[in-house]
Amino acid sequence: MSRGPVLAARLQGFGTTVFAEMSALAVATGSINLGQGFPDYPGPPEVLDVARNAIGTAADQYPPGPGIPELRSAIAEHQQRFSGLAYDPDTEVLVTAGATEALAAVMLALLEPGDEVVLLEPVYDSYSASVAMAGGVVRPVPLHPPAGGDGHWTFDPADLRAAVTPRTRLLLLNTPHNPTGTVLTADELAVLGKLAVAHDLLVVTDEVYEHLVFDGARHVSPATVPGLRERTLVVSSAGKTFNVTGWKVGWICGPAALVAAVRTAKQFLTYVNAGPFQPAVAAGLRLPDGYFTALARDLQGRRDVLVRGLRDAGLPVVSPEATYFATVDVRPVQPDGDGLAFCRSLPARAGLVAVPSGVFYTPEHAHLGRHLVRFAFSKGDGVLAEAVRRLVGMGRAGAGSA
Ligand SMILES: *Cc1c(COP(=O)(O)O)cnc(C)c1O
Protein backbone atom coordinates (compact mmCIF):
# COMPACT_ATOMS: atom_id res chain seq x y z
CA MET A 1 0.00 0.00 0.00
CA SER A 2 3.01 2.28 0.41
CA ARG A 3 3.07 2.75 -3.36
CA GLY A 4 -0.16 4.79 -3.35
CA PRO A 5 -3.66 3.97 -4.57
CA VAL A 6 -3.99 0.41 -5.87
CA LEU A 7 -6.50 1.38 -8.58
CA ALA A 8 -4.73 2.57 -11.72
CA ALA A 9 -5.07 6.26 -12.46
CA ARG A 10 -7.01 5.62 -15.66
CA LEU A 11 -9.77 3.96 -13.58
CA GLN A 12 -9.97 6.56 -10.81
CA GLY A 13 -13.56 7.66 -10.48
CA PHE A 14 -14.93 4.28 -11.66
CA GLY A 15 -15.24 2.75 -8.16
CA THR A 16 -18.29 0.81 -7.04
CA THR A 17 -21.39 1.89 -8.88
CA VAL A 18 -24.58 3.26 -7.42
CA PHE A 19 -26.29 0.22 -9.04
CA ALA A 20 -24.61 -1.98 -6.43
CA GLU A 21 -25.67 0.35 -3.62
CA MET A 22 -29.27 0.46 -4.82
CA SER A 23 -29.53 -3.29 -5.41
CA ALA A 24 -28.16 -3.93 -1.90
CA LEU A 25 -30.69 -1.43 -0.55
CA ALA A 26 -33.50 -3.29 -2.32
CA VAL A 27 -32.43 -6.57 -0.71
CA ALA A 28 -31.90 -5.04 2.74
CA THR A 29 -35.31 -3.31 2.76
CA GLY A 30 -37.34 -5.88 0.83
CA SER A 31 -38.13 -3.23 -1.78
CA ILE A 32 -39.20 -3.85 -5.37
CA ASN A 33 -36.10 -3.28 -7.50
CA LEU A 34 -36.88 -1.10 -10.51
CA GLY A 35 -33.24 -0.02 -10.60
CA GLN A 36 -31.40 -2.57 -12.69
CA GLY A 37 -32.67 -3.19 -16.22
CA PHE A 38 -33.39 -6.86 -16.58
CA PRO A 39 -36.64 -8.76 -17.19
CA ASP A 40 -38.00 -10.99 -14.42
CA TYR A 41 -39.81 -13.20 -16.97
CA PRO A 42 -38.26 -15.95 -19.12
CA GLY A 43 -37.25 -15.94 -22.77
CA PRO A 44 -39.03 -17.77 -25.60
CA PRO A 45 -39.18 -21.56 -24.93
CA GLU A 46 -37.89 -22.37 -28.45
CA VAL A 47 -34.67 -20.53 -27.57
CA LEU A 48 -34.31 -21.86 -24.01
CA ASP A 49 -34.82 -25.45 -25.22
CA VAL A 50 -31.97 -25.22 -27.72
CA ALA A 51 -29.60 -24.15 -24.92
CA ARG A 52 -30.80 -26.91 -22.60
CA ASN A 53 -30.29 -29.51 -25.30
CA ALA A 54 -26.83 -28.18 -26.18
CA ILE A 55 -25.49 -28.68 -22.64
CA GLY A 56 -23.70 -32.02 -22.38
CA THR A 57 -22.70 -31.97 -26.05
CA ALA A 58 -19.61 -30.75 -27.90
CA ALA A 59 -21.10 -27.23 -27.56
CA ASP A 60 -19.74 -27.18 -23.99
CA GLN A 61 -16.18 -26.79 -25.33
CA TYR A 62 -14.46 -23.71 -26.81
CA PRO A 63 -16.43 -22.51 -29.82
CA PRO A 64 -14.49 -21.02 -32.78
CA GLY A 65 -12.94 -17.61 -31.98
CA PRO A 66 -15.31 -15.53 -34.12
CA GLY A 67 -18.39 -17.51 -32.95
CA ILE A 68 -20.02 -20.67 -34.33
CA PRO A 69 -20.79 -20.42 -38.08
CA GLU A 70 -24.51 -21.07 -37.45
CA LEU A 71 -24.75 -18.03 -35.17
CA ARG A 72 -22.73 -15.79 -37.47
CA SER A 73 -25.04 -16.74 -40.36
CA ALA A 74 -28.11 -16.09 -38.22
CA ILE A 75 -26.74 -12.67 -37.23
CA ALA A 76 -26.13 -11.77 -40.88
CA GLU A 77 -29.65 -12.94 -41.85
CA HIS A 78 -31.12 -10.94 -38.97
CA GLN A 79 -29.29 -7.76 -40.06
CA GLN A 80 -30.48 -8.28 -43.63
CA ARG A 81 -34.08 -8.85 -42.48
CA PHE A 82 -34.34 -5.89 -40.10
CA SER A 83 -31.92 -3.25 -41.42
CA GLY A 84 -31.56 -4.34 -45.05
CA LEU A 85 -27.75 -4.42 -44.75
CA ALA A 86 -25.73 -7.39 -46.01
CA TYR A 87 -22.78 -8.62 -43.91
CA ASP A 88 -20.50 -11.53 -44.78
CA PRO A 89 -20.83 -13.97 -41.87
CA ASP A 90 -17.20 -15.11 -42.28
CA THR A 91 -15.44 -11.74 -42.32
CA GLU A 92 -17.91 -9.08 -41.19
CA VAL A 93 -19.51 -10.66 -38.08
CA LEU A 94 -17.95 -11.32 -34.67
CA VAL A 95 -19.64 -12.95 -31.67
CA THR A 96 -18.72 -11.40 -28.31
CA ALA A 97 -19.36 -11.83 -24.57
CA GLY A 98 -22.32 -9.48 -24.66
CA ALA A 99 -22.46 -5.97 -26.05
CA THR A 100 -20.29 -4.93 -23.11
CA GLU A 101 -17.26 -6.91 -24.28
CA ALA A 102 -17.91 -5.83 -27.86
CA LEU A 103 -17.70 -2.17 -26.83
CA ALA A 104 -14.61 -2.72 -24.67
CA ALA A 105 -12.86 -4.60 -27.48
CA VAL A 106 -13.77 -1.83 -29.94
CA MET A 107 -12.17 0.81 -27.74
CA LEU A 108 -9.06 -1.27 -27.04
CA ALA A 109 -8.67 -2.11 -30.73
CA LEU A 110 -9.33 1.28 -32.28
CA LEU A 111 -8.18 4.02 -29.88
CA GLU A 112 -4.71 5.45 -29.43
CA PRO A 113 -4.05 7.10 -26.05
CA GLY A 114 -5.56 10.58 -26.11
CA ASP A 115 -8.02 9.81 -28.92
CA GLU A 116 -11.42 11.35 -28.32
CA VAL A 117 -14.82 9.68 -28.41
CA VAL A 118 -17.91 11.83 -28.97
CA LEU A 119 -21.06 10.39 -27.42
CA LEU A 120 -24.55 11.44 -26.42
CA GLU A 121 -25.15 11.95 -22.71
CA PRO A 122 -26.71 10.63 -20.44
CA VAL A 123 -24.71 7.58 -21.32
CA TYR A 124 -24.68 3.86 -20.50
CA ASP A 125 -22.22 3.42 -17.66
CA SER A 126 -19.76 1.03 -19.32
CA TYR A 127 -18.90 3.44 -22.17
CA SER A 128 -16.80 5.92 -20.21
CA ALA A 129 -14.97 3.11 -18.41
CA SER A 130 -14.19 1.30 -21.68
CA VAL A 131 -12.90 4.49 -23.26
CA ALA A 132 -10.79 5.17 -20.15
CA MET A 133 -9.33 1.64 -20.13
CA ALA A 134 -8.21 2.22 -23.71
CA GLY A 135 -6.62 5.55 -22.76
CA GLY A 136 -9.22 7.55 -24.68
CA VAL A 137 -11.10 10.68 -23.69
CA VAL A 138 -14.88 11.11 -23.68
CA ARG A 139 -16.43 14.23 -25.24
CA PRO A 140 -20.08 14.24 -24.17
CA VAL A 141 -22.87 15.97 -26.08
CA PRO A 142 -25.97 16.42 -23.92
CA LEU A 143 -29.40 15.15 -24.88
CA HIS A 144 -32.14 17.48 -23.66
CA PRO A 145 -35.66 16.41 -22.68
CA PRO A 146 -38.57 17.84 -24.67
CA ALA A 147 -39.68 21.19 -23.28
CA GLY A 148 -43.38 20.38 -22.97
CA GLY A 149 -43.06 16.92 -21.43
CA ASP A 150 -44.19 14.76 -24.33
CA GLY A 151 -41.91 14.20 -27.26
CA HIS A 152 -38.34 13.27 -27.65
CA TRP A 153 -34.96 13.84 -26.01
CA THR A 154 -32.60 15.30 -28.57
CA PHE A 155 -29.24 17.04 -29.01
CA ASP A 156 -28.32 20.48 -30.30
CA PRO A 157 -26.33 20.08 -33.55
CA ALA A 158 -24.18 23.05 -32.49
CA ASP A 159 -23.11 21.16 -29.34
CA LEU A 160 -22.27 18.19 -31.53
CA ARG A 161 -20.11 20.24 -33.88
CA ALA A 162 -18.37 21.89 -30.91
CA ALA A 163 -17.48 18.49 -29.42
CA VAL A 164 -15.45 17.41 -32.45
CA THR A 165 -11.73 18.24 -32.42
CA PRO A 166 -8.72 17.12 -34.45
CA ARG A 167 -8.28 14.31 -31.86
CA THR A 168 -11.78 12.89 -32.40
CA ARG A 169 -11.53 9.30 -33.60
CA LEU A 170 -14.91 7.83 -32.94
CA LEU A 171 -18.61 8.66 -32.66
CA LEU A 172 -20.33 6.32 -30.20
CA LEU A 173 -24.11 6.15 -30.58
CA ASN A 174 -26.78 4.25 -28.68
CA THR A 175 -30.16 3.98 -30.35
CA PRO A 176 -32.69 3.15 -28.95
CA HIS A 177 -31.12 5.03 -26.06
CA ASN A 178 -30.65 3.95 -22.45
CA PRO A 179 -31.60 5.68 -20.15
CA THR A 180 -33.81 8.22 -21.98
CA GLY A 181 -35.81 5.82 -24.18
CA THR A 182 -35.19 8.03 -27.22
CA VAL A 183 -35.03 6.54 -30.71
CA LEU A 184 -32.82 8.64 -32.98
CA THR A 185 -34.81 9.80 -36.02
CA ALA A 186 -33.68 9.68 -39.64
CA ASP A 187 -33.12 13.47 -39.51
CA GLU A 188 -30.94 13.24 -36.39
CA LEU A 189 -29.00 10.35 -37.89
CA ALA A 190 -28.45 12.38 -41.07
CA VAL A 191 -26.85 15.16 -38.97
CA LEU A 192 -24.67 12.63 -37.14
CA GLY A 193 -23.78 10.86 -40.38
CA LYS A 194 -22.74 14.07 -42.14
CA LEU A 195 -20.50 14.94 -39.23
CA ALA A 196 -18.88 11.49 -39.20
CA VAL A 197 -18.18 11.65 -42.92
CA ALA A 198 -16.93 15.26 -42.83
CA HIS A 199 -14.42 14.48 -40.04
CA ASP A 200 -13.64 10.94 -41.19
CA LEU A 201 -14.78 9.43 -37.88
CA LEU A 202 -15.41 5.80 -37.12
CA VAL A 203 -18.94 5.15 -35.83
CA VAL A 204 -19.93 2.59 -33.23
CA THR A 205 -23.63 2.02 -32.59
CA ASP A 206 -25.05 0.15 -29.63
CA GLU A 207 -28.42 -1.21 -30.76
CA VAL A 208 -29.21 -3.69 -27.96
CA TYR A 209 -32.77 -2.28 -27.72
CA GLU A 210 -33.36 -2.50 -31.49
CA HIS A 211 -36.54 -4.57 -31.05
CA LEU A 212 -37.95 -2.85 -27.95
CA VAL A 213 -39.55 0.09 -29.78
CA PHE A 214 -43.08 1.38 -29.14
CA ASP A 215 -45.94 3.22 -30.83
CA GLY A 216 -45.02 4.70 -34.18
CA ALA A 217 -41.30 4.96 -33.48
CA ARG A 218 -39.03 3.02 -35.82
CA HIS A 219 -35.48 1.91 -35.13
CA VAL A 220 -33.09 2.96 -37.88
CA SER A 221 -29.63 1.43 -37.76
CA PRO A 222 -27.13 4.25 -38.16
CA ALA A 223 -25.17 1.98 -40.52
CA THR A 224 -27.97 2.47 -43.09
CA VAL A 225 -27.26 6.22 -43.33
CA PRO A 226 -25.48 7.06 -46.62
CA GLY A 227 -21.70 6.99 -46.15
CA LEU A 228 -21.79 5.14 -42.84
CA ARG A 229 -21.86 1.40 -43.69
CA GLU A 230 -18.14 1.42 -44.49
CA ARG A 231 -17.13 3.25 -41.28
CA THR A 232 -19.60 1.77 -38.78
CA LEU A 233 -19.48 -1.11 -36.32
CA VAL A 234 -22.97 -2.22 -35.27
CA VAL A 235 -23.11 -3.73 -31.79
CA SER A 236 -26.07 -5.70 -30.47
CA SER A 237 -26.87 -8.50 -28.08
CA ALA A 238 -29.28 -11.30 -27.25
CA GLY A 239 -29.90 -10.18 -23.67
CA LYS A 240 -32.67 -7.66 -24.19
CA THR A 241 -34.19 -9.25 -27.30
CA PHE A 242 -34.67 -12.73 -25.80
CA ASN A 243 -34.96 -11.90 -22.05
CA VAL A 244 -31.62 -13.60 -21.33
CA THR A 245 -29.42 -10.84 -19.93
CA GLY A 246 -27.28 -13.38 -18.04
CA TRP A 247 -26.26 -15.24 -21.19
CA LYS A 248 -23.96 -12.46 -22.40
CA VAL A 249 -24.06 -13.25 -26.09
CA GLY A 250 -23.41 -10.18 -28.21
CA TRP A 251 -22.09 -9.41 -31.66
CA ILE A 252 -20.51 -6.88 -33.97
CA CYS A 253 -21.22 -6.35 -37.67
CA GLY A 254 -19.08 -4.10 -39.81
CA PRO A 255 -16.50 -3.85 -42.59
CA ALA A 256 -13.99 -6.72 -42.53
CA ALA A 257 -10.96 -4.57 -41.66
CA LEU A 258 -12.68 -3.05 -38.62
CA VAL A 259 -14.07 -6.39 -37.46
CA ALA A 260 -10.62 -7.99 -37.80
CA ALA A 261 -9.14 -5.21 -35.65
CA VAL A 262 -11.76 -5.76 -32.94
CA ARG A 263 -11.25 -9.54 -33.12
CA THR A 264 -7.57 -8.95 -32.32
CA ALA A 265 -8.47 -7.32 -29.00
CA LYS A 266 -11.40 -9.61 -28.24
CA GLN A 267 -9.35 -12.81 -28.58
CA PHE A 268 -7.26 -11.74 -25.58
CA LEU A 269 -10.20 -10.64 -23.43
CA THR A 270 -12.49 -13.68 -23.27
CA TYR A 271 -11.31 -15.46 -26.45
CA VAL A 272 -14.76 -17.14 -26.62
CA ASN A 273 -17.81 -17.60 -24.43
CA ALA A 274 -21.29 -19.08 -24.08
CA GLY A 275 -20.81 -22.30 -26.08
CA PRO A 276 -24.26 -23.82 -25.47
CA PHE A 277 -25.98 -20.45 -25.75
CA GLN A 278 -24.63 -19.67 -29.20
CA PRO A 279 -26.89 -22.14 -31.07
CA ALA A 280 -29.82 -20.98 -28.93
CA VAL A 281 -29.31 -17.34 -29.90
CA ALA A 282 -29.03 -18.45 -33.55
CA ALA A 283 -32.47 -20.03 -33.20
CA GLY A 284 -33.80 -16.86 -31.58
CA LEU A 285 -32.53 -14.60 -34.35
CA ARG A 286 -34.37 -16.81 -36.85
CA LEU A 287 -37.73 -16.55 -35.07
CA PRO A 288 -40.50 -15.15 -37.26
CA ASP A 289 -41.31 -11.42 -37.30
CA GLY A 290 -44.27 -12.11 -35.02
CA TYR A 291 -41.97 -12.87 -32.09
CA PHE A 292 -40.28 -9.47 -32.31
CA THR A 293 -43.50 -7.48 -32.72
CA ALA A 294 -45.15 -9.34 -29.80
CA LEU A 295 -42.10 -8.62 -27.62
CA ALA A 296 -42.40 -4.87 -28.27
CA ARG A 297 -46.20 -4.86 -27.87
CA ASP A 298 -45.96 -6.64 -24.53
CA LEU A 299 -43.30 -4.26 -23.22
CA GLN A 300 -45.27 -1.24 -24.46
CA GLY A 301 -48.12 -2.36 -22.19
CA ARG A 302 -45.70 -2.51 -19.24
CA ARG A 303 -44.40 0.96 -20.11
CA ASP A 304 -47.97 2.31 -20.11
CA VAL A 305 -48.66 0.84 -16.66
CA LEU A 306 -45.53 2.34 -15.12
CA VAL A 307 -45.82 5.73 -16.84
CA ARG A 308 -49.42 6.08 -15.62
CA GLY A 309 -48.31 5.15 -12.10
CA LEU A 310 -45.44 7.63 -12.14
CA ARG A 311 -47.76 10.41 -13.31
CA ASP A 312 -50.36 9.49 -10.66
CA ALA A 313 -47.56 9.76 -8.08
CA GLY A 314 -46.90 13.32 -9.23
CA LEU A 315 -43.66 12.57 -11.06
CA PRO A 316 -43.32 14.22 -14.49
CA VAL A 317 -42.13 11.65 -17.01
CA VAL A 318 -41.38 11.63 -20.73
CA SER A 319 -43.06 8.47 -22.02
CA PRO A 320 -40.16 6.52 -23.55
CA GLU A 321 -40.26 5.54 -27.24
CA ALA A 322 -38.26 2.38 -26.57
CA THR A 323 -36.15 0.36 -24.08
CA TYR A 324 -36.89 -0.84 -20.54
CA PHE A 325 -36.74 2.58 -18.87
CA ALA A 326 -38.70 5.67 -17.92
CA THR A 327 -36.95 8.78 -16.60
CA VAL A 328 -38.72 11.09 -14.14
CA ASP A 329 -38.07 14.57 -12.78
CA VAL A 330 -38.19 14.22 -8.98
CA ARG A 331 -38.46 17.93 -8.15
CA PRO A 332 -42.22 17.94 -7.41
CA VAL A 333 -41.72 15.35 -4.63
CA GLN A 334 -38.09 16.14 -3.72
CA PRO A 335 -37.88 19.94 -3.38
CA ASP A 336 -34.06 20.06 -3.23
CA GLY A 337 -34.02 18.29 -6.61
CA ASP A 338 -31.50 15.69 -5.45
CA GLY A 339 -32.17 12.47 -7.37
CA LEU A 340 -29.64 10.48 -5.35
CA ALA A 341 -31.26 11.54 -2.05
CA PHE A 342 -34.66 10.67 -3.53
CA CYS A 343 -33.43 7.17 -4.47
CA ARG A 344 -31.91 6.64 -1.03
CA SER A 345 -35.24 7.58 0.59
CA LEU A 346 -37.45 5.67 -1.85
CA PRO A 347 -37.31 2.30 -0.01
CA ALA A 348 -38.66 3.98 3.15
CA ARG A 349 -41.11 6.19 1.26
CA ALA A 350 -42.53 3.61 -1.10
CA GLY A 351 -40.76 0.23 -0.79
CA LEU A 352 -39.17 0.78 -4.19
CA VAL A 353 -35.69 1.13 -5.63
CA ALA A 354 -34.74 3.18 -8.71
CA VAL A 355 -31.47 4.59 -10.06
CA PRO A 356 -30.41 8.26 -9.91
CA SER A 357 -29.66 9.35 -13.47
CA GLY A 358 -26.74 11.48 -12.30
CA VAL A 359 -24.61 8.34 -12.70
CA PHE A 360 -25.22 8.48 -16.45
CA TYR A 361 -23.47 11.86 -16.76
CA THR A 362 -19.82 12.88 -16.81
CA PRO A 363 -18.81 15.18 -13.91
CA GLU A 364 -18.87 18.26 -16.18
CA HIS A 365 -22.57 17.68 -16.98
CA ALA A 366 -23.67 16.22 -13.64
CA HIS A 367 -25.99 19.19 -13.05
CA LEU A 368 -28.07 18.18 -16.10
CA GLY A 369 -29.02 14.86 -14.51
CA ARG A 370 -29.13 15.74 -10.81
CA HIS A 371 -32.96 15.84 -10.61
CA LEU A 372 -33.57 12.80 -12.82
CA VAL A 373 -34.27 9.22 -11.76
CA ARG A 374 -34.62 6.10 -13.93
CA PHE A 375 -37.24 3.39 -13.33
CA ALA A 376 -37.26 0.03 -15.18
CA PHE A 377 -40.59 -1.44 -16.33
CA SER A 378 -39.32 -4.81 -17.63
CA LYS A 379 -41.12 -6.59 -14.79
CA GLY A 380 -43.99 -9.08 -14.59
CA ASP A 381 -47.60 -7.94 -14.24
CA GLY A 382 -47.85 -8.62 -10.50
CA VAL A 383 -44.60 -6.86 -9.61
CA LEU A 384 -45.43 -3.89 -11.80
CA ALA A 385 -48.96 -3.55 -10.40
CA GLU A 386 -47.62 -3.63 -6.83
CA ALA A 387 -44.90 -1.10 -7.70
CA VAL A 388 -47.54 1.25 -9.11
CA ARG A 389 -49.72 0.83 -6.00
CA ARG A 390 -46.75 1.83 -3.86
CA LEU A 391 -45.89 4.79 -6.09
CA VAL A 392 -49.41 6.16 -6.00
CA GLY A 393 -49.50 5.64 -2.21
CA MET A 394 -46.31 7.69 -1.95
CA GLY A 395 -47.98 10.46 -4.00
CA ARG A 396 -50.92 10.54 -1.57
CA ALA A 397 -48.68 10.48 1.51
CA GLY A 398 -46.62 13.31 0.01
CA ALA A 399 -49.71 15.41 -0.71
CA GLY A 400 -50.97 14.94 2.84
CA SER A 401 -47.77 15.70 4.68
CA ALA A 402 -46.76 18.92 2.89
C1 LIG B 1 -27.93 -3.76 -21.25
C2 LIG B 1 -27.09 -2.90 -22.09
C3 LIG B 1 -25.88 -3.36 -22.61
C4 LIG B 1 -25.26 -4.66 -22.16
O1 LIG B 1 -25.42 -5.66 -23.04
P1 LIG B 1 -24.80 -7.11 -22.69
O2 LIG B 1 -25.09 -7.88 -23.91
O3 LIG B 1 -25.48 -7.60 -21.47
O4 LIG B 1 -23.35 -6.91 -22.44
C5 LIG B 1 -25.18 -2.56 -23.50
N1 LIG B 1 -25.65 -1.34 -23.85
C6 LIG B 1 -26.78 -0.85 -23.34
C7 LIG B 1 -27.24 0.50 -23.75
C8 LIG B 1 -27.52 -1.60 -22.43
O5 LIG B 1 -28.62 -1.09 -21.88
Image (cartoon, grey):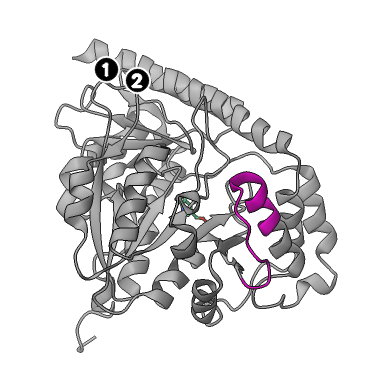
Is ligand 1 less than 8 Å from the beta carbon at label 1?
Answer: no
Q: Quadrant of residue 331?
A: top left
Q: Quadrant of residue 241?
A: top right
Secondary structure category for the residue under label 2: helix
User: What residue lies at 34% left-to-right and 59% top-to-bottom?
Assistant: 197
Identify the image quadrant of the C terminus: top left
Query: Which residue has dot 2 on it?
Result: 394
Q: Residues within 10 Å of mark 1 (few under 14, many from 20)?
A: some
Is ligand 1 less than 8 Å from the beta carbon at label 2?
Answer: no
Distance between the Cα atoms at labels 2 and 1? 6 Å
Along the line of sight, which residue is nearer the eye, 308 or 148? 148
Q: Residue 13, position in %: x, y? A: 24, 65
Q: Residue 252: which disc?
A: none
Q: Is residue 123 above or below residue 295?
A: below
The three-letter amino acid code for the residue at tag 2 is Met
Query: Which residue has dot 1 on it?
Result: 398
- Taking the magenta stretch, the answer to whether it contains residue 294 is no
Q: Residue 79, position in %: x, y? A: 63, 52
Q: Residue 135, position in %: x, y? A: 29, 76
Q: Is residue 25 above or below residue 202?
A: above
The three-letter amino acid code for the residue at tag 1 is Gly
Residue 333 shows in the view: yes
| Segment tinted magenta in the rendering | 75-91
Q: Is residue 210 above or below residue 329?
A: below
Residue contact between numbered discs 2 and 1, judged by CB atoms under 8 Å: yes
User: What residue lies at 37% left-to-right and 45% top-to-bottom?
Assistant: 190
Q: Residues within 10 Å of mark 2 (few under 14, many from 20)?
A: many
Identify the image quadrant of the N terminus: bottom left
Secondary structure category for the residue under label 1: helix
